[in-house]
Image (cartoon, rainbow, N blue to C red):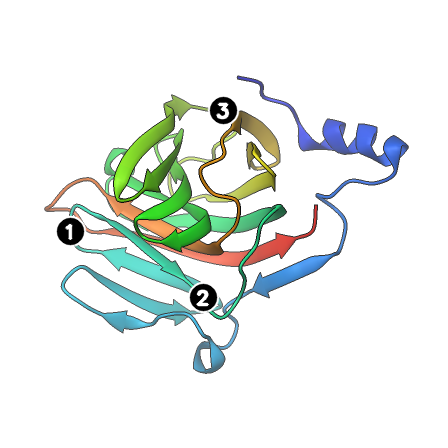
Amino acid sequence: MRSVGVGLLCAVAVVLGGCSLFRSGILYEETWSDAGSSEWYIGDSELNTVWIEDGRYHDLVKQATTMMNWNSQAGTFASAQFDVDVRHEAGTDSLSAGGLVFRFTDAENTYIFQVSPSGYFRVGKWVADVWATMVNWTASDAINTGTAENHLTVLADGTSLTFLINRTEVAEITDASFSAGFVGVTVQAFDENVDVEESFDNLVVREL
């Protein structure tokens, strides 16, 4: 697994004619700046509570489960760059995770990219409601631990999937399970007795 600064990747790309990480070509952008006009789910259930506050999308998960939220009015997206900022707000660091879902069909069919505030990340997928780990929980110095924010990026180019945390590449995978879908965010709690809250901002989908 490589850990390559995106700045270096872009320096090479500029010579070749551009770098997608700094190009415009925005296909979809969500900053959650106006709760009243958001098309994203807001509500309360026995599983979680979701709300928008101070320009961030919050999801408080109350049980040991994985919750996913997305905007079905935006997309679908195939080959694209996906970015989001995720911040850990509450919950035991080693028993919490937040992240990005992409090429999402439904909660039973999607790719998922997670980061834990304890300094680990994971990549996986749900296919017909069966979980498959693609990169198991792996420590990375690229991750800001605790309540610090992390910027997640996925470069999905056909079957080539590249994952970056804070502009540092942490994994590269080839997989053909999903070719297109929606984009969303995810929160996972691993302890039935400890609530987990993550918040999100600056979700952007760009052309490659």
Instruction: Give the number of the mark in front: 3 or 2.
Output: 2
Disc 3 and disc 2: Cα gap in Å? 32 Å
Please report the residue visible at 28 percent of the width from the left and 45 percent of the height from the top.
188
Residue that numbered label 1 is attached to: 63
Instruction: Give the number of the mark in front: 2 or 1.
Output: 2
Q: At label 1, which amino acid type do we have? A: Gln
Q: Residues within 10 Å of mark 3 (few under 14, many from 20)?
A: few
- Report helix, strand or loop for mark 2: loop
Q: Position of residue 58 (x, y in %)?
A: 36, 61
Q: Position of residue 200 (x, y in %)?
A: 45, 56
In the figure, is residue 18 to the left or right of 186? Answer: right
In the figure, is residue 14 to the left or right of 104? Answer: right
Residue that numbered label 3 is attached to: 141
Please report the residue visible at 45 percent of the width from the left and 63 percent of the height from the top.
56
Among the two numbered marks 1 and 3 on one chain, the one whose residue lies closer to the N terminus: 1
Q: At label 3, which amino acid type do we have? A: Asp
**Label at residue 71:** 2
Please report the residue visible at 30 percent of the width from the left and 49 percent of the height from the top.
108
Q: Position of residue 14 (x, y in %)?
A: 85, 35
In the figure, is residue 206 to the left or right of 130? Answer: right
Q: Position of residue 192 (x, y in %)?
A: 11, 45
Please report the residue visible at 44 percent of the width from the left and 67 percent of the height from the top.
72
Q: At label 2, which amino acid type do we have? A: Asn
Disc 1 and disc 3: Cα gap in Å? 29 Å
- Report helix, strand or loop for mark 1: loop
